[in-house]
Amino acid sequence: MLEQDVRTLRRAYVEARDESDPFEKFNRAQGVGAVVDPYAGLAAMRAITPVHRVELSALMGNVELPTSMLAAKELFVALTFDTVFEVLRDGARFSSKGYADSMGPVMGHTILEMDGEEHLRYRALLSRAFTKRALERWERDLVRPVIHAYVDRFAARGSADLVRELTFPFPVRVIAGMIGLPESEHARFHRLAVELISVGIDRETGMRASRELRELFAPVLAARRREPQEDLISVLAHAELEGTRLTDEEIYAFLCLLAPAGAETTYRSSSNLLVGLLTHTDQLDALRRDARLMPQTIEEGLRWECPLLNILRTATADTTLGGVAIPAGAPVSVNLGAANRDPSRWNDPERFDIFREQKPHIAFAFGPHVCLGMHLARMETRVLLETLFERLPNLRLDREAGDATISGLIFRSPRALPVRFDPATA
Ligand code: HEM
């Protein structure tokens, strides 16, 4: 049941505090490796009620909660597609301001925590960096070369761990390249980004990472203010909002959000899709034979195992959701994973099936805060699969070399993806 999974997560969370590797620390705090199948508990709960009410004190114990949650006695978990959709669609009734407590101290005031008019204005401005033209340029100049460079390192070997050697590092290199950071700083940027979002487990390191990231961005921003180039910092440095330019701090906040928003998610979603395909080889073969199946394959991967299971909203007034009364100020956990496996929307929802009837999923959320980078994420996943098919003939899972089980309660992904393939000859 859900409570049991949360207790397992709580243990993993406490243990994660002693972990020294920042990447492993964050993974463990998400329940990766500990909570394998939260879906059974979510399904059992969803069969009883569309919105599950949880006593916060009983559930979380000694885990540090955002201040907004400490004041609340209960947490409401939206579990069906319809209730999740209803929450996300209505930013006036369900605010995003809760992120100001959890992420604000390290990221700054980002669009993620803005509501209403303010959000609309900033979003319109930041969207200018994500044009179709920019996407085409990023595919050609950044995503494809970055993915090929990682594959070059193991293509002749005949075996690899695709998580450690490809899906984990490549999206953060893409974000760093988009931003315009020098190559020499990419590894540092990755570590700092993960330390930043681990602030809930290790506040001191999170705050230090926040300061260091600003130090990393500052010289690049100053240079681009003087002389713009074709990168995201230049677009942000010269974009105008009602006649005024974004301040340095506004730009830093957006850049701090991009790494976790864009890299953690894409790394995990592309790993999950690979698990789906490599454990369903009939579907893998069908996709290899017919590239037209690519878009529906990517969407099914996101529906079946979305990388980020929960997001958070706060009720702005007393309201009712799915027949359940929610008091003003109560936190609402929006369970994207449960919504994506709602049996009233999809037949046999636990099954990975690229041929299923196509209906929009909700892995990228919906409404005002729908993912700003979703087209980029889809493109990265497509290029990843195209490259693997082209470069690694006869790609298959190597079950003896390790476990590729997907796990986690908040972020989900496999810890490893050991594969074999026909080695490239020089
Ligand atoms: C498969 C990969 C991805 C998934 C599943 C995903 C999922 C999401 C979700 C669920 C949200 C809504 C969060 C909330 O409202 O609480 C979101 C927002 C956002 N995402 Fe993504 N994301 C992905 C990739 C990316 C990429 C590649 C970027 C950019 C480089 C990105 C940038 C953003 C930004 C800036 C927001 C905030 C939008 C706003 O508040 O208006 N995401 N994403």
Image: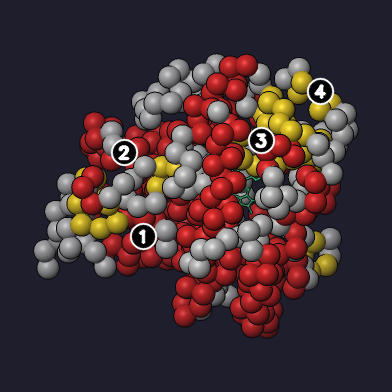
**220 with respect to 397 (left or right):** right
Which residue is drawn at the image coordinates 41% and 42% (left, top)? 406
> Mark 1: few, some, or many residues within 10 Å (few <14, many ≥20)?
some
Instruction: Name which residue type carries label 2.
Output: Leu
Disc 3 C-beta below 8 A from ligand 1: yes
Label 4 vs label 3: CA separation?
16 Å
Residue hosting label 4: 325
N-terminal-most mark, 2 or 4: 2
Is 416 left, or right, of 43 in this rendering? left
Q: Residues within 10 Å of mark 3 (few under 14, many from 20)?
A: many
Foreground residue, 276 or 411? Answer: 411
Q: Which mark is residue 277?
A: 2
Would you say 5 lies left or right of 219 here? Answer: left
Q: Earlier in the sequence, mark 2 or mark 3?
A: 2
Answer left or right for 316 relative to 161.
right
Q: Tell me where residue 382 appears, x and y as whole percent.
A: 39, 47
Viewer can see residue 323: yes
Badge number at residue 334: 3
Q: Which residue is mark 1?
A: 164
Pick the quarter of the image with the C terminus.
bottom left
Q: Secondary structure at mark 4?
A: strand
User: Residue 148's spot in the image, x, y percent?
Assistant: 31, 63
**Marks 3 and 2: in contact by CB < 8 Å?**
no
Q: CA gap, disc 2 to disc 3? A: 27 Å
Q: Quadrant of residue 313?
A: top right
Q: Disc 4 or disc 3, which is closer to the eye?
A: 4
Q: Earlier along the polypeptide chain: callout 1 or callout 2?
A: 1
Mark 1 → mark 2, Cα distance in angstroms: 18 Å
Q: Position of residue 180 (x, y in %)?
A: 55, 73
